[in-house]
Image (tube, rainbow, N blue to C red):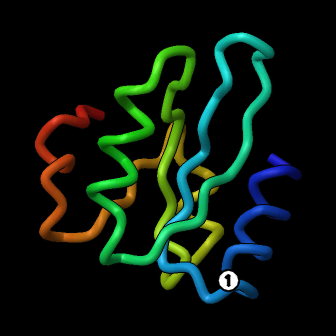
Amino acid sequence: MEDIIRWFTEGRKKSADFMLVVCDDFSHEDYPVYLSIDEFDSRYTEISSEDMQTIMASYNLSIGMERQINQYRCHEMPPASIHRRSIRS
């Protein structure tokens, strides 16, 4: 959770709208990808279709951090995202 908090804070400083937490399936290491709302769908699609990459969570950096980090695999997305329908709780 410490990484998520640090990445969340870093993303806000960079004025990003969203953050994806991506797992490199080869090294088993997670890393953040910061996105604007305009690039969310295209980058989400790109990353989710790459070999050896899994999107573990997505965070909305413009709303409260605590509620999101306390969710198991948070998936906050833009309201009009084409990916909202593909995520199940």
The residue closer to the viewer here, 59 or 14, is: 14
SS under mark 1: helix
The residue closer to the viewer here, 82 or 1, is: 82
Q: Is residue 73 above or below residue 82?
A: above
- Residue under label 1, please give it: 12
Report the quarter where the C terminus lies. top left
Q: Is residue 40 left or right of residue 55?
A: left
Count up the numbered dots: 1
Residue at image coords 48%, 16%: 51
Residue at image coords 61%, 55%: 33
Q: How far across and down, in percent of the image, does residue 36 sit? A: 44, 77
Q: Is residue 88 above or below residue 15?
A: above
Q: How far across and down, in percent of the image, does residue 42 sit? A: 29, 55
Q: Is residue 60 left or right of residue 78?
A: right
The residue closer to the viewer here, 25 or 87, is: 25
Q: Is residue 51 above or below residue 33?
A: above
Q: How far across and down, in percent of the image, does residue 65 sit? A: 62, 71
Q: Residue furthest top?
A: 26
Residue at image coords 27%, 57%: 41
Q: How far across and down, in percent of the image, does residue 28 sit? A: 76, 17
Residue at image coords 27%, 69%: 78
Q: Is residue 60 left or right of residue 31?
A: left
Which amino acid is tagged 1? Answer: Arg
